[in-house]
Image (cartoon, rainbow, N blue to C red):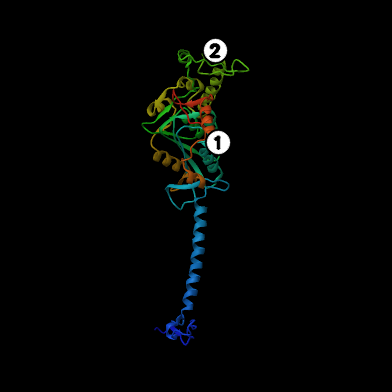
Amino acid sequence: MSDNTFAIEGLPPNPPDRGGNTSPAASVPPVVVHVPAPGSGWKVRVLTILLIFATIYILQLTAQQEQYFAAGEGTSVREQYHSGSKTATERIVRIEVNGVIMTPFSDSTLDAIKTAAADDRVKGVLLVVNSPGGLVTTSHQIYRELVQLREKKPIYVSMKDMATSGGYYISMGAGPEGVLFAEPTTWTGSIGVIVPRYNVSELAKNLGVSVESLKTGALKDSLSPFRDLTEEDLAVWNAIIDDSFARFVDVIHQNRATLDEARVRELATGQIYTAQQALDHGLVDRIGYEDDALAALRTHLQLENPRVVTYVSPPSLLGALMGGAREQSPEETLQSWMQLTVPRAMYFCSWLPVLPAVQ
């Protein structure tokens, strides 16, 4: 037996059984007690102290990381490192606009623009556009926020595959002082407005289907695919389209110094322009890639090696756990179908814009 253990012996024997017999005391095993080796207590205390200091250090690192990646107070947006210096205070923010411009999918773009405007560490913004456009209202909302942002910080634009219609509209947010870059294979232009409508009245007649909606006025079912448009219908919707089109033309005219209103209207046929055509017409400033646009912005800001970041919105815990697995209820499915029937004026590069429903 080691020096740090000893046995307690001499315990009483087991009690007698009914016959008066007792078991030998030897049948009771000795109780073995382990005693800590002399001087081992200081080791435990040292390890405990080290553990406390390590915990405090980890908490400090976590707090510093949160502060480092925070994009600003009062926002859930977080920074994600893209390029440049990892330790620089000055920042250039990349704000990406991808896909169809429409609520609620463009809400994160609006949040990013507002966050960049409020963060004093952000010295400039690179707007990276890869979009065929989308809803008139959402496009104008993004443009408006960019106009407010450019009053504080310069905006340059890098156009990717497509920056057409609403994608070109929001690019005007860079203003006359901003520089628009288009890649050699970029499609842009498609300046105009579209309100999708399908006429299936002849098909309905052939199928013996008639639609007799109860309505309070002749225009309440305007754009119904089950009847032809009347002169009154055309007058109403042409006024709506003309209003949106005039705003598009004015936005380009106000933000492209070399284009007057008459020239913009000549270009606004809905045509898609190649990068070279767009450059020749004055719709963009340079042909180049995102790296070129970023380098030009860095030179304009006189920043040698700033930290270039993008903004990301972390998903909620419930959203991460649920993912996209939740099935729609019958009521939500009905709402989705009804949303598809709502008339929408669009700055959109498509003759058949099939849009997802907005919940």
Q: Is residue 105 above or below residue 270?
A: below
Crowding at label 1, few (<14), some or many (≥20) Cα neighbours within 10 Å?
some
Q: Is residue 183 visible?
A: yes
Three-letter code for the amino acid on which mark 2 is drawn? Thr
Crowding at label 2, few (<14), some or many (≥20) Cα neighbours within 10 Å?
few
- Locate residue 351, reporting x and y percent: 44, 22
Q: Residue at x 51, y 60 (%)?
A: 59
Q: Secondary structure at mark 2?
A: loop
Q: Residue at x 49, y 59 (%)?
A: 61
Q: Residue at x 54, y 12 (%)?
A: 230
Q: Nearer the viewer, residue 189 or 237?
A: 237
Three-letter code for the amino acid on which mark 1 is drawn? Glu
Circles 1 and 2, Cβ within 8 Å, touching? The answer is no
Q: Which residue is mark 1?
A: 145
Residue 203 in which image quadrant: top left
Residue 283 in which image quadrant: top left
The label on residue 37 is: none
- Locate residue 80, reporting x and y percent: 46, 47
Cα distance between the residues tagged 1 and 2: 38 Å
- Locate residue 268, reporting x and y percent: 47, 22
Q: Nearer the viewer, residue 287 or 197?
A: 197
Q: Secondary structure at mark 1?
A: helix
The label on residue 230 is: 2
Q: Residue furthest right?
A: 216
Badge 1 or badge 2: first in the primary sequence: 1
Q: Nearer the viewer, mark 1 or mark 2?
A: 2
